[in-house]
Amino acid sequence: MSSASPSSASAFAGGSTSAAGRSIPHESAAAQVAGSAVYIDDMAEISGTLFAAPILSKIAHGTLRGVDASAALALPGVRGVVLAKDVPGHPHLATFVGDEPIFAVDSVQHIGQVVGLVVAETFMQARKAAHMVQLQVDALPAVLTVKEALKAKSFVLPPVFVQRGDAAAALQRAPHTLTGTLEVGGQEHFYLEGQVDYAVPHEQNQWQIFSSTQHPGEVQHWVAHALGLDNHAVKVECRRMGGGFGGKETQAGHLAVWAAVAAHKFKCPVKMRLDRDDDFMVTGKRHPFEYEYTAGFDDTGRLCGLQLMMAVNCGFSADLSGPVADRAVFHADNAYFLEDVEIASYRCKLNTQSHTAFRGFGGPQGMIVIEAIMGDIARHLQLEPLAVRRRNLYEIETRHTTHYQMKVEDNILLPLINQLEQTSGYQKEREAVAEWNRSHAIIKKGIALTPVKFGISFTATLFNQAGALVHVYTDGSVQVNHGGTEMGQGLHTKVCQVVADELGVPYARVLISASDTSKIPNASATAASAGTDLNGRAAQFAARNVRNNLAAFVSGLDNCGAGAVRFENGFVTTPTSTRSFDAVVGMAYANRIQLWSDGFYRTPKIHYDKTTLTGRPFYYFAYGAACTQVAIDTLTGESRVTKIDILHDVGRSINPAIDIGQIEGGFIQGMGWLTTEQLVWNDKGLLTTHAPSTYKIPTAGDVPRHFKVDLWPEPNPEDNVFGSKAVGEPPFMLALSVYEALRDAIAWARRDGHAVRLAAPATAEHVLAALNQ
Amino acid sequence: MKSQPIHFIRRGDLVKLDDVPATRTLLQVLREDLKCVGTKEGCNEGDCGACTVVLGELRDGKVRYESVNSCIRFAHTINGKALWTVEDIAPAVLNGPSVTQGASTMPVSTLLHPAQQAMVDCFGSQCGFCTPGFVMSLFASYQNRVCQGETVTRDSAQHDLSGNLCRCTGYRPILDAAEHMGQLPPVQVDEKRLLQKLKQVAPISMDSKADSSYKLPQNLPELLEARARWPQAKIVAGGTDVGLWVNKLFMDFEQVIDVTQVAELRRIEPYPQHIAIGAAASLNDAFAALVQDRPQLKHFTDRFAGLPVRNSGTLGGNVVNGSPIGDSMPLLIALRSSVVLMRQSKGRTLHRELKIEDFYLGYRKTALAPDEVLAWIKVPRPQRSRSPSPSPLHGEFLRAYKISKRFEDDISAVCLVVNLDLENGRVKAASMGVGGVAATPVRAAKTEAVLTGQPWSPASVAKAQATLRSEFSPISDMRASSGYRREVLGNLLQRFWLESQGADDINLESGLLEVQP
């Protein structure tokens, strides 16, 4: 186990001879702190490069009659505009559903929809001119709320119903029932580097796209589709992103296509990046959800029946809303056994930005409602909330199968919660909170300990595959490439660690270069937390192939079995000799041994039925729990998080410091979603929070001094790279403890035992409203 | 219109830039003209800190280091100063290549500045895009604290990093880096050399050529002359709002008069009855002076924007800008401040003084005449209690409250500053400034009237709460609803009452809630 401090992080650096398992700094850290790490907008532009800026709809829904760009075209430096008619290939983006035009064709569907581009000699010229383009739009009625969409049956995809047992009958029998509604807001990704792409036409209609994307393969596919080319004519490269969080999974493709269409029209390289305000207006966000539920339970707080309706605000097109809404359904149980349950999931179409992937991918929205129900059951029965949560946990011998028919085989929920209960001092702290609240009228404290169980694998089974290339050069240095992308999460660092160990060379001998569709084809998005699981394994297999080649060669030299050849610390050892890795590589090259290899991995065991949402969608579950304390000001509704204790399961950690970074960062991002980060659309459908001046992600001042993270000490029981578990998304949902602690504090102030109705995010205004109910 | 060259010090040497347009930002010059792309654009409005750079200037014979947002700062504002970006602080370049020898033979660890190395050691960078900005805020902290023998604490780190957003780390490793950098082998700016260079580069007087687009008057007569001669020119102080008009609203100003180097207007002068704050004094300096007299304002002033904006922005700029949600005006109204406006007419210097609330005529409309400038803000000082022993029921009782979605670096939904003069348990005088409830910052005159002359009692407070809730018709917007704003106004008066009765644990800012690790 490790604690989150630099001293303990460096403790991992000593002693071990292997790279994996150590807290090695991020592969780009030294360049990043020196300002020499290159992001797309930092690349020196090729002479003749033009810049594109988007022309945005100012109407939420309407018929597009015309575009008047005369004022824009009169400005200095402006070269022209790009509209739907300029798309040489298919006018729609190559999304799964195919319902999104590249540029608005004859209708506009949200404020901020991209109608076209202005192309100019500088970024500022293009932006300024784009704002002067006049659109002729006849306004049509717009659907701006989930309730309107439900009423009008305005959906991007058909509803999905999942059930087990007979929820209605169970609710009839239940000694107690609670009925409620909940509204949970969306979230802007706020990657610090906005969306950016650079499209460069090459000879013979071949293209190179530099894209800040989590999914170079999709960018390639989309650009080819839009230009009317085969995929092989487009090469996409991404060295790193300045943050992604799901926001550059599909959304980067839009910019790449726009830049490429502009480059096609003007026959020169085009760079396109979105100013922050445009980024907010154009790109999708975390899906806002609304819920209605009835939960039945017995005197001990055990759930016996649940009817749950989730209405998902998908925005104007499907994008990834289907799989997001599915994952919300899959995670409506969080850590709890739902015996008789019926879930309806509506994928609502609204005239807003098209909401998209965001860390957790519907999981957080699935889990928040069941955690809210747990908290309210405890209040209703005047039981201790952790006891109610424990009472409902998945068990080992019975009550172990999810509502989608997957057996939970790796359940560590109870021991993990028990351990955090001890290390966080939960029971003692709860008493102290009670004591404080009895003697303080204005400031009320709250505490909550909530678990996380998060399924790992892409729910679309086909995406669970990955490829890698490992090259050993004649000097013994190693280069690795894989299909994953680096957005700060440390994927490249971890993959290098795994490859270094597989070849038995020092970590510093392994270098990774940009993700590139011409090196690894058909790679899945770096998403679903699965980056290391998939690409780490593929790279490990590639390195293993090279090592096997070298072992066979050395065993021939020393007359031993290949299995007797060991690769460690830069040396290759047989029962009779020790040679440096570099020397072996040199000899192998001279003997015409292949020094490079591909590697391929597909996740075993997974399958599921897309229509009934049943099967085994996940290879395994990642677990965690957080205990959080808060204080609220009952005069204003303002709140502060005052103490955080986390115990999280990353299996056997490949890089503890990087994993702790994911846990802390995920938690704080989740805290932001549930507290200060409020997206506000006005009654015209205009997003009025479209910059950091109005949209507030957490700052350093929001992080409490007591912020302790421990790692669960057991490896992943499933066969996964290094025994590790995925870590990107699961910690995000640890922040549900913040929401539950706030509701606890509100309940202390109200002292009426009623359910606490608190809309998320819990802004000061929402908290005050909950206090006043 | 032409512009005069910009002279500044970078990497120990003098740099001269020609023909930079008046409204070109420092970030544009760095990234697009100089191709120094280490400094990033995150929001282009001074709210995320990815573009943070550090400026050094000569103040009272010493170098003063300040982190600023390069995205909303006009490039001309660095004329006469020293500039450091993330690419300028490694030991090999910090004091110029001519000073540092043998960099290539140094071990890797010494190739980075402690502010950089600490970020590596503590895993403070993930995606790395905010990192250059954090590094520069840390560099300023290093110069201002570590090099002065001060230990960086968790609190001072949060203060110094208040203008930087990170979306990846959750900040803990960055705060650790702030505390850790002082333990690394020290790296020093060669201040002796720098001071010498700064003296060489300091402008002596304004370029008064008619066709020069960026006027940097160095003293009050020059400013008044410039204002009189070029009434169409845009007056700019810290530029923390004007920069947004350029970046986001595409405004352009052919000619700019920058007041921030007017020596007289940078001064803060204490007099027995009042403090005179020059219109070009930075928010930081102005707030420091106010907090010295009234320490209870510290939390409030620390919550005004983030540190880089307080370094750049001026109190005068905030006042003239007159935003209904600017936080300094409710405070200045409650403190019964006044503004001194100056102009030059027929060779004579004229001035007039207005009560601050009378300065505002409507939404972003002030009484400032086209040929006038704001010169001074006069803030009355607290008068010593006539009671022999200080008592909360005697003398000035002042509190400033700010309600925003985020604690730090946010804009108020509601701001309320209450200043009561109590005498023997009665309200001798009441002065209350409110923000976020009207088209301008306003005085809560009706509520003041309800309280004045009344006993300071729960009954009076209840009456005042009801009046305050109905005195204004605030709008609903993305920051809060009208109903919330009204309700909270009254509730804040309740808090004020409780605090006047000695309650010190009824505020989330009180520090009592902090749990040690």
Image (cartoon, grey):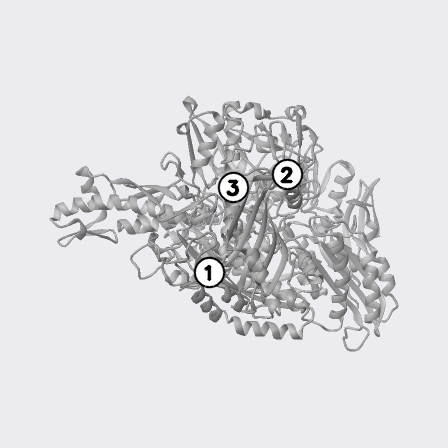
Q: Is residue A229 left or right of residue B230?
A: left
* Residue A699 in view of the camera: no
Dot 3 falls on a residue whose secondary structure is loop
| Percent coordinates x, y for residue B369 in the rendering | 82, 42
**Residue type (three-letter) at the residue carrying disc 1:** Gly
Pointer 3 residue: A320
Residue A351: numbered disc? 2
> In front: B484, or B204?
B484
- At x 77%, y 54%, the residue is B377
Pointer 1 residue: A624
Circles 3 and 1, Cβ within 8 Å, touching? The answer is no
Q: Kindly give the residue lying farthest to the left in the view shown.
A: A559
How many residues crowd around disc 1 within 10 Å: few (fewer than 14), some, or many (20 or more)? many
Callout 3 and callout 1 share a chain = yes
> In front: A103, or B371?
A103
Callout 2 and callout 3 share a chain = yes
Give the CA distance from mark 3 to mark 1: 26 Å
Dot 1 falls on a residue whose secondary structure is strand
